[in-house]
Image (cartoon, rainbow, N blue to C red):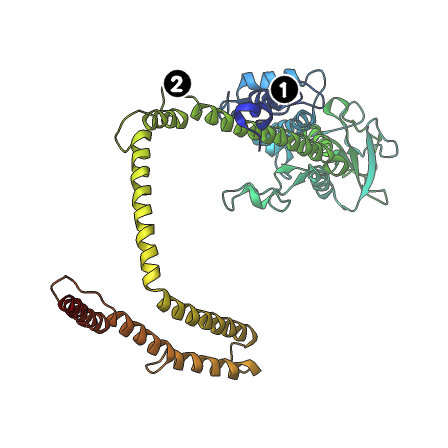
Amino acid sequence: MADPAVDGAALMGLTKATDGAAKLLKAAMTARDASSAGPAFGSGYVMPAARTGGVGNTQLSTWGITKESMDAWTLANKTTAGDTHKWWVAARAVSKACQDWHTKWTNDSTKLTAGNAAFAETEVKWNTDTASGACNSGSNPAGGTWGNNAANDAPTCKTACQEASRGMLIDPDASGMDLGGGKNANEASKVMAKYSGASTYCAGWSFETGNASKCKLLSAAVAEASRPVPVSSGATANAADRCFQMTTPAPFWEIQNTLQSAYATVTATNEALQVAMKNEIIKQVLLEKAWLTAWYKQQYWAALANQLNVVSADTTQAKTITALKADVDKDDPATTCTKGAKAARDTADTKLTDATDALAKLQTTTAEAAAVVADLGKRIIRADAAIAELDALANAQATGTLDAAAALRVKEWTDYKGVAGEATLAASAKLAAEGAVKPRSGAQVTDGGKLTEDRAVAQGTWDAAKLAAQKAQTDLT
């Protein structure tokens, strides 16, 4: 392993070809917050909000949408609009058209309500506007197309025209656009503009008694400024014939058509705008993740550098260890310093030498007993090995062929260690032998073992005999 003191830069990845943690964090932040188009675009280009948290080296990002942040985001997307901005522009168009519709409906809904007087019409007459008659349905006026209807009287024909214009409406509840708040009057009726498809309105109606198809409706799909105007057919043979132009549906259609076009843009090509927007957001998320990774790495090295700072005002690990080392290296006889520790070591060495000598003497005294114990130990080891091998071969249910042998071995072991077993007898013999050679506790006492006392008696007898012999020899001379 490399030595940090010698090759610390390599250990930390600080080489000529690799930036340090602080530089990596700065680069990640620059990429994350970029505000221009290109492969390295960032939140300034993608997010219509200002970062109010996560500034500098903090890891938490929060966002605040303000006029200034929206202006900055719009400016960043002015030259080359990003996918998020494109989707937002399209969605904003839908929102505006929807709002325009609700405003129009709130103010003028009676003008598109069948049977209501505000759903206005103007009769088209002939003969200097004094006589009623049917429209000239054989010729389509600019912007309109005549079509047949099954109504058999003028009032029903008018209602059919009004209902045809209401074809641009939908029931928001039935169309998956529940207004919320539980059931209310709006949810049971058509109050929302059709957004998922084009529609037309009825610009006029004609009732002609003598025609095979008495009722005809003038269908249109143009703005109010281009609304088709029906023309009277002239003299009529029946007083019930009528020709009317409808004056209120076109403004509703203009807003419905705008909403439908905006909605079609948002959902075009399998919602390609939304998919592209999501992909752009995902790229931004990856930039955020890369920055967070760099932030954690920088914080790690910053914390490590702080702990390695021996002159810091804080109590760092390096400062603590340096202080402890200074205390240990003091030339102080106290046992908490190096000098005291060495003295304690020398004393311990002396005691160890004395103990080693005492142990050698004890080993000499108990050599025979140790030999017996060693022999017994060998037999125990062999028995343990046999038991371990049998355990490995036998199963948990004790139905294997080696279980019986194991039982015999266990019995042999039990007998060996039992009251009359060899181990017990040997231990008793050892104890008796040690008792027989037990030394006296003093020179003038006779509390030694039997052999010790017998030896003392024999020695005394021998000494007395030797003295007697010496005396006899002296007497002879």
Q: Position of residue 431 (x, y in %)?
A: 28, 72
Residue 356 visible in the picture: yes
SS at circle 2 = loop
Left or right? Give the position of 215 relative to 404.
Answer: right
* Pick the front one: 442 or 204: 442
Residue reaching furthest to the right: 138
Q: Which of 65/293 is in front?
A: 293
Q: Which mark is residue 34?
A: 1
Residue found at x 57% / y 24%: 7
Q: Is residue 398 visible?
A: no
Residue extending furthest toward the front = 477
Label 1: how many residues lie within 10 Å, few (<14), some (14-19) or many (20+)? some
Rendered location of residue 33, percent (x, y): 60, 21
Rounded to the nearest whole Å, what is the CA distance between mark 2 and mark 1?
39 Å
Which of discs 2 and 1 lies nearer the camera? The answer is 2
- Give the residue type that dot 2 points to: Val
In the picture, the quarter occupied by the C terminus is bottom left
Apparent side of residue 257 relative to residue 183 in the rendered image (left or right):
right
Q: Is residue 191 above or below residue 39?
A: below
Q: Quadrant of the N terminus?
A: top right
Residue 309: x and y in percent read: 43, 21
**Residue at image x 30%, y 48%?**
354
Label pair 2/1, CB-CB below 8 angstroms = no
Numbered mark located on residue 311 in the image: 2
Considering only vertical position in the picture, is 356 above or below 416? above
Looking at the rendering, which quadrant does residue 94 occupy?
top right
What residue lies at 25% left-to-right and 30% top-to-bottom? 334
Dot 1: element? loop
What is the three-letter code of the residue carrying label 1?
Ala
- The mark nearer the N terminus, 2 or 1, is 1
Please tell me which residue lies in front, 331 or 402: 331
